Image (cartoon, rainbow, N blue to C red):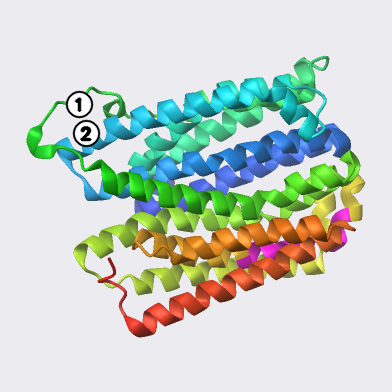
């Protein structure tokens, strides 16, 4: 069988899954190379920038999810009006948050014990681009144009990887955190390729297709709230460790987090496939439960393999990924992977309910996100204790999600008439 015939048999969904695996591999390579080149102390500053991007990504992901949902529900003129509305607001919010980051760059430097404030200035300037990039991706996601969606991730990842590593070697006199910030900023431009011009085309005023903004704003606010709670759960530990521990310990913990979160990054691939399908099936009156269970099964299998690998070969994994300097953290690898895996499974349930307009899991996640922060603030005598607090929080979160899911399922077995 020829290569071309094999390629033709690959569906868009399979291509997207392979693409996301490759992109996540590239992003991992990016972090691993930074860890090896910089060492634990300097890597701590780099990890703050990467984590800050993840923290602010709750807004970007909100724009992407909202755009994906209404790209499924709206067509033609109504969709065009919606895109104009969401683009304008993304630009406003991006500029506002960017200005905040630039204005408070000195305070951020003091808060996170970084060598320079310039890294935050460069980062802040790029935020409007990040949100526009999210809308572009959301439109591709909602319209199920997964090949073009994959390309946006390819271009962003390869640009960030090649440019950042190249600049670190070609400009050794420049502060490494500034180099990393520049790489992130320029990669946003590449993440816009291919760009859909319909997003910025001027909308024609059509009285018959006036946009009802209230339900969009409500869904946006609820999604943003959930994304924020997810980011708090997934990233507050790195920020708190950077605050409470020295740079070497923080750098070691950052490497642990990057290795342990591989399951979460791959699980996000399934979330992106799940969301538009559930919305479309609910629109068509089709039972959405089977597709949820399919993706939960995928993540459970994936998580089990990763946890076993981290438990059986922790030192080998750390050596291969970051090098011998990071071996002191190896004993915590399987525990961190366990916490992340539990969160990934709980997250699938939460996004499922979000897509069918059930918002109680959002409140549950917010409560548990704050609980995790409080527990780490109270119990941080060692890095192991920080990880144990996360495992405890994630177990409680998953139990809540399962109880809520089972209660809804028995009350309404098909969950397809939920409003």
| Residue 390 image point, x, y percent | 72, 63
In the rendering, which numbered label is found on residue 203? 1
Circle nearer the N terminus (1, 2): 2
Q: Secondary structure at mark 2?
A: helix
Instruction: Identify the residue at image location x=54%, y=58%.
Output: 267
Instruction: Identify the residue at image location x=53%, y=65%.
Output: 364
| Residue 288 image point, x, y percent | 32, 70
Classify mark 1: residues with Cα within 10 Å, few (<14), some (14-19) or many (20+): some
Instruction: Identify the residue at image location x=26%, y=49%.
Output: 72
Predominant secondary structure, magenta span: helix
Over which residues does the magenta segment extend?
Answer: 329-342
Q: Nearer the viewer, residue 303 or 408?
A: 408
| Residue 323 image point, x, y percent | 86, 45
| Residue 90 image point, x, y percent | 41, 31
Horizontal side of residue 350 vs 187, given as left or right: left
Circle 2 residue: 81
The Cα–Cα distance between marks 1 and 2, rounded to whole angstroms, is 6 Å
Instruction: Identify the residue at image location x=79%, y=55%.
Output: 377
Q: Nearer the viewer, residue 22 or 406?
A: 406
- The answer to whether mark 1 and mark 2 are in CB contact below 8 A is yes
Quadrant into which the C terminus falls: bottom left
Horizontal side of residue 101 vs 127, given as left or right: right
Horizontal side of residue 395 vs 353, given as left or right: right
In the rendering, which numbered label is found on residue 14? none
How many circles with numbers are drawn on the protein?
2
Which residue is situated farthest in the bottom direction here? 410
């Amino acid at each position: 069988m020829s290569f071309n015939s094999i390629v033709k048999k690959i569906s868009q969904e399979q291509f997207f899954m392979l693409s996301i695996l490759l992109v996540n591999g590239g992003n991992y390579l990016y972090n691993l190379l930074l860890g090896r080149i910089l060492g634990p102390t300097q890597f701590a500053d780099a990890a703050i920038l990467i984590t800050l991007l993840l923290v602010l990504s709750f807004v970007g992901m909100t724009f992407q999810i909202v755009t994906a949902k209404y790209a499924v529900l709206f067509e033609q003129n109504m969709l065009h009006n919606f895109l104009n509305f969401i683009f304008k607001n993304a630009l406003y919010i991006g500029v506002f948050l960017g200005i905040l980051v630039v204005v408070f760059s000195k305070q951020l430097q003091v808060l996170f014990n970084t060598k320079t404030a310039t890294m935050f200035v460069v980062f802040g300037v790029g935020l409007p681009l990040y949100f526009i990039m999210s809308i572009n991706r959301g439109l591709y996601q909602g319209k199920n144009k997964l090949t073009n969606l994959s390309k946006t991730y390819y271009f962003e990842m390869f640009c960030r990887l090649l440019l950042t590593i190249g600049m670190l070697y070609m400009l050794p006199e420049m502060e490494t955190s500034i180099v990393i910030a520049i790489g992130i900023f320029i990669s946003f431009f590449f993440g816009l390729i291919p760009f859909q011009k319909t997003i910025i085309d001027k909308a024609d005023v059509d009285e018959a297709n006036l946009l009802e903004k209230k339900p969009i704003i409500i869904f946006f606010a609820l999604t943003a709230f959930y994304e924020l709670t997810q980011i708090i759960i997934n990233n507050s530990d790195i920020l708190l460790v950077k605050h409470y521990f020295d740079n070497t310990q923080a750098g070691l913990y950052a490497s642990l987090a990057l290795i342990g979160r591989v399951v979460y990054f791959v699980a996000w691939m399934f979330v992106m496939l799940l969301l538009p399908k559930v919305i479309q099936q609910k629109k068509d009156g089709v039972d959405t439960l089977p597709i949820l269970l399919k993706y939960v099964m995928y993540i459970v299998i994936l998580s089990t393999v990763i946890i076993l690998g981290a438990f059986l070969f922790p030192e080998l994994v750390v050596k291969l990924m970051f090098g011998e300097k990071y071996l002191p953290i190896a004993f915590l690898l399987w525990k961190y992977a366990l916490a992340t895996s539990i969160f990934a499974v709980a997250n699938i349930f939460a996004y499922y309910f979000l897509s069918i307009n059930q918002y109680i899991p959002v409140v549950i996640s917010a409560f548990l996100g704050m609980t995790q922060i409080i527990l780490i603030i109270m119990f941080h005598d060692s890095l192991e204790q920080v990880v144990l607090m996360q495992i405890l929080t994630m177990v409680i979160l998953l139990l809540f999600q399962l109880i809520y899911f089972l209660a809804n399922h028995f009350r309404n077995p098909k969950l397809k008439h939920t409003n």
